[in-house]
Image: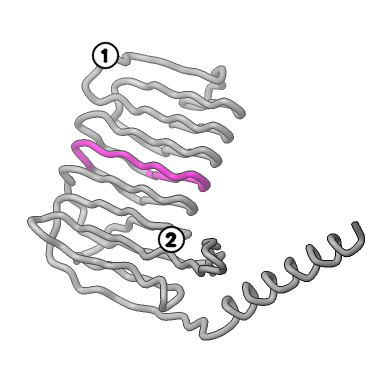
Amino acid sequence: MRKMLILIFIVVIAIGGVYFLYNSNDIKTVNKNFSVESFEQIKVDNSIDNIRLVTGDRYSVSYTGQEKLEPSVKVKNGILTIDSPERSITINGSIFNVKKLKQELIIEMPKQELKYLSIDTSNGNISADHLEVQKGKIDTSNGSINIKNLVMKNEFEIDTSNGTVKVGKTNAAGYDLSTSNGHITVEGKNKSDEFEKNTSAENVLSIDTSNGNIYVN
């Protein structure tokens, strides 16, 4: 029994050493600006910690973070597509995902209506100053979502497993809001853990969080 415990201890130390060396070596950070063409749709699929949508006088994408995790950015047929690589190491056939340093992705565009917005991230906060879209969906496993002004023509969905969702101002005609562990506040009034209003409307705002509060003004 004692030999087995010693063996387990040695294996754990060895794996930890490899993990530390892999993480500590050659960690280079970059600040990169991508010059992109105009776009009317956005599709983001990555693990970047923070994503910001800002209003400006041009179309651009900027990235701050590890060089090895620099995302792929391209515009084709009016669709801005952003994908980031997953960093992992293999030891005896097992894959260990490596914890990433704090990173940020900023998408700048003029104030205009997007045809479609899709953001899917496993870990990170998402924020937008002004978002005008025909239809959209934001999905994050772990992170808060903050949209100061949301203008929508059709349904807009927000889904997070763990995080607070705030929508400052919106033209939504209907609501479908739900939280498993948290509270809901609509226009300054406290609601229960579920709130529905005019769900048959064309532009319904749907928000679902497993663990977090929902605020809509």
Q: Amino acid at mark 2?
A: Ile
- x then y, percent, for residue 117: 25, 45
Residue 188's place in the image compared with 52, above or below, is: above
Q: Where in the figure is residue 129, as x and y percent of width and height?
A: 36, 51
Any mark on residue 112, and which? none
Tell me how the rendering is colored.
one colour
Compared with 130, 182 (above or below) is above
Mark 1: give few (<14), some (14-19) or many (20+) Cα within 10 Å: few
Quarter residue 83 falls in: bottom left
Q: Residue at x 39, y 42 (%)?
A: 139
Which residue occupies 38% across, 64% down? 105
Badge 2 element: loop
The magenta region covers 133-148
Above-or-below relation of 59 to 151: below
- Helix, strand or loop for the magenta stretch, by majority: strand
The residue at which mark 1 appears reads as 200
Which residue, given by chain and number where applicable, does mark 2 sit on? 48
Amino acid of disc 1: Ser
Cβ atoms at labels 1 and 2 below 8 Å apart:
no
Q: Quadrant of the N terminus?
A: bottom right
